[in-house]
Each structure stands twice: as structure tokens, then as C-alpha cells.
Image (cartoon, grey):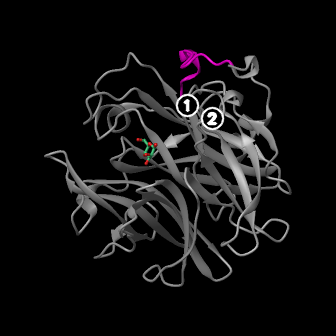
Amino acid sequence: MCAMFSFDRYAPVDESLFTTEPCITRYPDPVLTHKDVPYRSALTFNAGVLKKDSKYIMVFRNDIGDFDKQILEGTNLGLAFSDDGIKWNVEPEPCFAMADDEIMRVYDPRISYMDGQYILCFAVDTKHGVCGGIAVSQDLKHFEVKHISVPENRNMVLFPEKINGNYVRLERPMPVYSRNAHRFDMWLSESPDLEFWGRSKLVLAVEDVPYCNDKIGPGAPPVKTDKGWLCIFHSVDVDLSRGKHGWEDAWRKRYVIGLALLDLNDPSKVIGMSKKPLMVPEGYWEMEQGYRTNALFPCGMLMEDDGKTVRIYYSAGDSVVRMATANVDDLLALCTEPRK
Ligand code: BMA
């Protein structure tokens, strides 16, 4: 193995880093569970959220099945609207699904609105690997698929506006030859038209994140501030001694939420990063219940109309959607101030 990349397979992480930042306020209850869904639903999670014309719009992953019997039978994407971002009305039918001889399902949506159209990014499970997909829609009922990447790629997230004339996405390829271990990093690509993507660059690597020993991936469309793009991501540490949590025989991962600040004009440049997680799993909804406990997975982030309050929509336990708020200046300070 090349010495430069000699990682311990899963080096232990410093547990003292794993606290939620005090600037975070969680809404106490989930904002969406399978009980809110008027069609078959076992797990509602990994939800992209957008605020447009004072309305909140959510596209969420709906795993079909039976929560109480712990049965999962497939996945589609659901659509919900809200006046306050807390109480959601789910549309009567799912809004999007893909399946054919090659594609098994789409999942983990992120939503943006640009140039008069909604843009949905999602993961695509195919018989030949996981791809990233991008589709556009005028009405969130009819979608035109613009792009499906080569495998393996996941967690595509668009910046909310073009940068230097191009669409820009964050993404998380899954290289198997890079460091002789499972180390998946955050990358960026550009496109003039959402269809053709290139100029790919590494943005943030696992070894840059002091509380990660496995993989990171972009979370939600970044929020623009005058200091840079606020970017949340998920970060995973693995501890092989972790045993059964949730529905599976063993679940050895912990998913936390990280925070970074990217350069406004060249968002491949990380100009600040919180040296500890922004949020870690806490309490009943995040640690005790669900398909996979100990997993926070953010897919939505938006700035409120006051220009100060940032909302983060994240999943807990791959089972419910939750929401937390923070003041934008506190988030910026976490990225820019040296830690004591
Ligand atoms: C990731 C994806 C997500 C999921 C997360 C936590 O690898 O599969 O869909 O929410 O794991 O289980």
C-alpha cells in the first residue's frame, strides 16, 4: 500500500467530538412519518425541501411496506406541501418513481428551483451499480430525466444558482481503487445544461474531516451567505463492535451532520469547516427507533425570509423527517473561528 494513503481500516474516532453544537434547536417531533402518508408507506425519510413563494415543498423518499411488521417492498418519491414547514400535507399519490429492466429504483431526492423549473437530483439503483440522476419538472407531476451518471455515484446536490454561468453540483462518487479502503469523498462537477457534466474536482476528503473514518457525502443545496456557501454534509464513522440497532442484524455505522463553508466564486475551495459535527444523533427519535438508529441524513437546508434563520431538514433512523434551526451567523462562526 502507498504510505501516503496508509489508513487504519477504521481508525477509532475521538468520542469527545460527538456532541451537537449549542446553536442548533431541534423541533421536538418529527415533521413527517409514515402515518402522514395516504398511500402505502413504511419509512418516510431523506427529504429534499425547498421554500418558494412562501410555501414549503418537500420531496421525500417513501419506502413502501409495513413499519410495524418491519417489511420493505420498494421505493417511490412522495410530494408534500406546507405553509409553515412543520405541518405537511402529503399529495394523494407518489410523484416520481423509475423502474425498468435495468433500473430498480430512485431514492434520496434533493430539490432545487432554477430558471423556471424544479430540478430533482436523486440516486438510481441499477443492476450495474448506483448512479446519480437529475430530472426537471414544471409541476412536480411530470418529470423529464436529463442525466444519469455512470456508477458509482450518489448524493447529488445542486447549488441554488448558476456559478460563472454553469450549473454546479456536489456529488459523492464511490472509488474502490483510491486508498485500499472504503473512503468516499465529496466532489463537484459543472454543466452548461444539466445534461453534460465535467470539470470535476475533489472538494472535501474523508481525511479532512476529524470525526470521520469511512465516508462523507453532500447533504442539501448549499445556502448562500456573504461569506461563502454554507454546505452541510453527512459523515460516517464505523465501529465494528457496534451490534444490532434498528431492524437489521447489525448496524455498525453512525451518521452525523457536518458543516463547511465553500468559496462563493469557486465552490471547489473549502474556506472553512467546523472541526466537530454540527449535529449528532440524540434522543428517542434519533437513537432508539427506526430502521437504522444512529443515522442523521440531511437532504434539505434553506434560509428563512428573515435572512438569519437557517432550517435543516434531516432524517432520523432512516424512518422519519426532522427539522432543526440555527442562526446563520452562528453557523458561519463554527466554520471560521479557530476552536479552543
Ligand atoms: C446511505 C444511503 C442513504 C441512507 C444512509 C443511512 O448509504 O443508503 O439512503 O439514508 O445510508 O442508512
Q: Decide which of 219, 274 is in the foreground and name it.
A: 219
* Residue that carries the numbered disc 2 in the rendered image: 177
Q: Which tag, 1 or 2, sits closer to the chain's start? A: 2
Q: Quadrant of residue 23?
A: top right
Residue 327 is at least partly visible in this image: no
Q: Residues within 10 Å of mark 1 (few under 14, many from 20)?
A: some
Q: Residue furthest left?
A: 69
Task: Indicate yes or no whether the magenta region holds residue 10.
Answer: yes
Kindly identify which residue carries mark 1: 182
**First to last magenta residue range:** 6-20
Mark 2 crowd level (few <14, some 14–19, many ≥20, 10 Å Cα): few
The kind of residue on which mark 1 rests is His
Residue in the picture at 29% in, 41% down: 291
- The residue depicted at 29 percent of the width and 40 percent of the height is 290
Q: For this rendering, which residue is in front, 191 or 127?
A: 127
Quarter of the rendered structure image containing ligand 1: top left
| Numbered marks: total | 2
Residue 15, magenta (yes or no): yes
Residue type highlighted by circle 2: Tyr
Q: Main secondary structure of the magenta part?
A: loop
Alpha carbons under labels 1 and 2: distance apart: 9 Å
Give the structural element (helix, strand or loop) at label 1.
loop
User: Residue visible at 53% across and 16% down?
Assistant: 15
Confirm whether residue 320 shows in the render: yes
Q: Is residue 75 left or right of residue 231?
A: left
